[in-house]
């Protein structure tokens, strides 16, 4: 794949990029990933005594946390499959054994979203006989695995280029994509099932796990709620330590002209989903949040407020930056939002990556403003430029 292929005006060839095996993740990367697990989380896991039937067993796997719950029918349900990195399968098996479960006792795996650190081991669990559940729009990603994701690499790069990203930023993205050593095998279709909003799983002890569709982080993203214990398994929708940036999603490829495949705007549905979860918290139905990364959170209302305030502030900033008039691209807006990053870029590859992330957030807020009907978009030499047409409603 060459950068020229994504510069607008040139033909885009969508070919699944083969991973260079020599670039696979090294021992040091794995150690760093493992170190990311917070001490608190480990204390929480090991400090538990007197677990009840509906107490989740957390499986900390290289920076992710998978949760195992006892099913009424016997065996276990997993919330998320876990990342496929060296050693994670063995760790998951050893941790399940502490509750007397073997891998084939895992009957159901509810994957919160298709990202490789959450879905990576889905095929392994399926091979042991588990049924794998995901939101309908994420099912094709799980069925295709890494090839599905890589078939969209050029679309993501082309979207950044169309929003004004310079070559150095695209090159940093390509270099990073090649570094990923996560395994992500396709999950066999017969083991896969689309799970709907409101679907329930009967847990041991009489509790029920209810699936809540929460599109945004991915198109088919979901969270799980156990009303009896007032626990919310949030995946990456709400995290204790980071606010995830909206990604660039292309759930459906246009078969005739892949380069024309529509982007799925993710921030508007994400904000709607967080609003739905806030309502659940305000109704007193959530005592504790169990995230896909990091330690459990007790003050869930505060966490939700922090996420909503973050996006309200960022949205207001993007609107304010557009206010003086004149057309601006998402890249220019990201540079103005993060002048320190912009100053480093393109010297620092890390800054380039962070700037690309900032761009996806700006694109998300542009999607929100466009949905509110306050933006006009003009394409100039292949770059989308935006102008504020009137004051957005407060
Ligand atoms: Zn994640």
Image: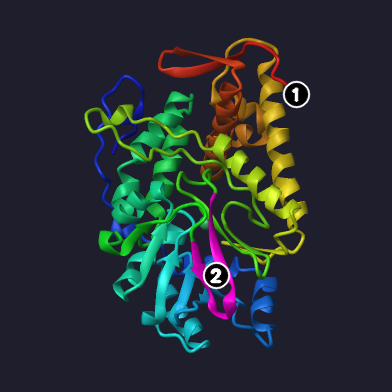
**Closer to the camera in the image, 238 or 3:** 238
| Rendered image quadrant of residue 316 | top right
Which span of residues is magenta-colored? 200-213
| Rendered image quadrant of residue 116 | bottom left
| Residue ID for mark 2 | 34
Q: Position of residue 213 (x, y in %)?
A: 52, 50
> Which of the numbered marks, if any, corresponds to residue 394?
1
Q: Residue at x 49, y 77 (%)?
A: 71
Q: Position of residue 114 (x, y in %)?
A: 42, 53
Q: Do we see residue 85 in this rendering?
A: yes
Q: Residue at x 35, y 47 (%)?
A: 149
Looking at the image, residue 208 sits to the left or right of residue 315; the answer is: left
Secondary element at image label 1: loop
Work out whether 320 lies above or below 185: above
Work out whether 316 lies above or below 26: above
Work out whether 372 lies above or below 274: above
């Amino acid at each position: 794949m060459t950068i020229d292929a994504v510069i607008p005006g040139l033909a885009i060839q969508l070919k699944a990029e083969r991973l260079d095996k020599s670039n696979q993740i090294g021992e040091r990367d794995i150690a760093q990933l493992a170190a990311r697990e917070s001490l608190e989380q480990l204390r929480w896991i090991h400090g538990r005594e007197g677990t009840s039937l509906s107490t989740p067993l957390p499986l900390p796997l290289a920076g992710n946390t998978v949760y195992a719950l006892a099913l009424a029918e016997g065996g276990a349900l997993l919330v998320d499959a876990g990342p496929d990195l060296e050693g994670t399968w063995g760790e998951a098996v050893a941790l399940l054994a502490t509750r007397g479960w073997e891998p084939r006792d895992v009957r159901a795996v509810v994957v919160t979203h298709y990202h490789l650190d959450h879905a990576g081991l889905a095929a392994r669990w399926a091979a042991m006989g588990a049924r794998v559940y995901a939101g309908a729009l994420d099912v094709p990603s799980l069925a295709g695995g890494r090839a599905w994701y890589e078939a969209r690499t050029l679309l993501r790069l082309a979207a950044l280029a169309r929003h004004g990203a310079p070559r150095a930023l695209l090159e940093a993205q390509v270099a990073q994509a090649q570094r990923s050593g996560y395994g992500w095998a396709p999950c066999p279709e017969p083991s896969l099932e689309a799970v709907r909003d409101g679907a329930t799983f009967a847990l041991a002890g009489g509790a029920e796990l209810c699936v809540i569709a929460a599109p945004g982080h991915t198109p088919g993203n979901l969270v799980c709620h156990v009303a009896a214990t007032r626990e919310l398994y949030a995946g990456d929708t709400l995290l204790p330590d980071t606010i995830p940036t909206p990604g660039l999603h292309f759930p459906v490829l246009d078969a005739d002209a892949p380069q024309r495949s529509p982007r799925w705007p993710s921030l508007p549905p994400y904000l709607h989903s967080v609003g739905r979860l806030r309502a659940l918290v305000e109704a007193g139905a959530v005592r504790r949040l169990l995230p896909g990364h990091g330690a459990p959170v007790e003050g869930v209302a505060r966490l939700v407020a922090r996420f909503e305030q973050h996006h309200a502030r960022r949205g207001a900033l993007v609107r304010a930056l557009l206010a003086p008039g004149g057309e601006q691209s998402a890249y220019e807006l990201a540079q103005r939002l993060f002048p320190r990053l912009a100053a480093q870029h393109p010297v620092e590859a890390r800054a380039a990556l962070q700037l690309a992330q900032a761009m996806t957030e700006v694109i998300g807020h542009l999607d929100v403003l466009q949905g509110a009907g306050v933006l006009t978009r003009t394409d100039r030499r292949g770059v989308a430029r935006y102008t504020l047409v009137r004051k957005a409603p407060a």
